[in-house]
C-alpha cells in the first residue's frame, strides 16, 4: 500500500429517513468496524444497530478498509438503522 492509504480525510454520514448528516474524520486505512465505532462514539448508535452503504453497496465486512471500498475524501456513506423487533 502507498503512503496515501493512511492520510486523514473527512467523509459524511447520512442517517437515512432522519434527514441528518454529519462529518466524520477518518483515514482510508480505517476498517469499517473502526468507522462504526467512531459513529457510535459521536451519535450513540450501537455498532450492531445499523448497516452502512456506499454507492448502493452494503459495507458488510467489518475488516475491509475504506480504501478497499474506494471511499475517498468527501465521500458520503448512508447509514440505515436496523429496526429491532421485540
Image (cartoon, grey):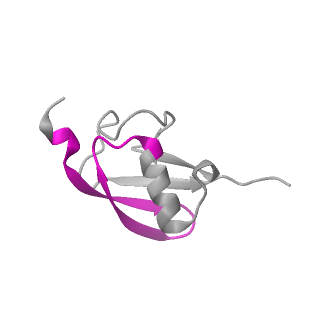
Indicate the position of residue 57 as horizontal and vertical percent values. Answer: 45, 38
The residue at 40%/33% (across/down) is 64
From the viewer's perspective, tell me whether residue 35 is left or right of residue 43.
left
Q: Is residue 59 magenta?
A: no
Q: Nearer the viewer, residue 26 or 70?
A: 26
The residue most toward the bottom is 19
The residue at 40%/68% (across/down) is 22
| Residue 82 drawn above or below residue 62 | below
Residue 55 seen from this side: yes
The residue most toward the left is 3
Instruction: Give the number of callouts.
Output: 0
Indicate the position of residue 37 as horizontal and vertical percent values. Answer: 49, 53
The residue at 49%/63% (across/down) is 41
From the viewer's perspective, tell me whether residue 4 is left or right of residue 60.
left
The answer to which image quadrant residue 69 occupies is top left
Quadrant of the snapshot with the N terminus? top left
The residue most toward the top is 1
Residue 15 seen from this side: no
The residue at 62%/48% (across/down) is 48
Quadrant of the snapshot with the C terminus? bottom right
Q: Is residue 23 magenta?
A: yes
| Residue 62 drawn above or below residue 22 | above
The residue most toward the right is 86
Q: Nearer the viewer, residue 41 or 10?
A: 41
Indicate the position of residue 83 as horizontal and vertical percent values. Answer: 71, 54
Indicate the position of residue 58 as horizontal and vertical percent values. Answer: 49, 39
| Span highlighted in magenta in the image | 4-33
| Residue 33 drawn above or below residue 18 | above
Amino acid at each position: 500500500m502507498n503512503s496515501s492509504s493512511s492520510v486523514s480525510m473527512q467523509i459524511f454520514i447520512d442517517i437515512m429517513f432522519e434527514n441528518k448528516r454529519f462529518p466524520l474524520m477518518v483515514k482510508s486505512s480505517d476498517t469499517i468496524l473502526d468507522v462504526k465505532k467512531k459513529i457510535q462514539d459521536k451519535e450513540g448508535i450501537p455498532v450492531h444497530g445499523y448497516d452502512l452503504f456506499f454507492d448502493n453497496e452494503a459495507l458488510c465486512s467489518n475488516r475491509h478498509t475504506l480504501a478497499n471500498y474506494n471511499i475517498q475524501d468527501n465521500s458520503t456513506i448512508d447509514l440505515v438503522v436496523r429496526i429491532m423487533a421485540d
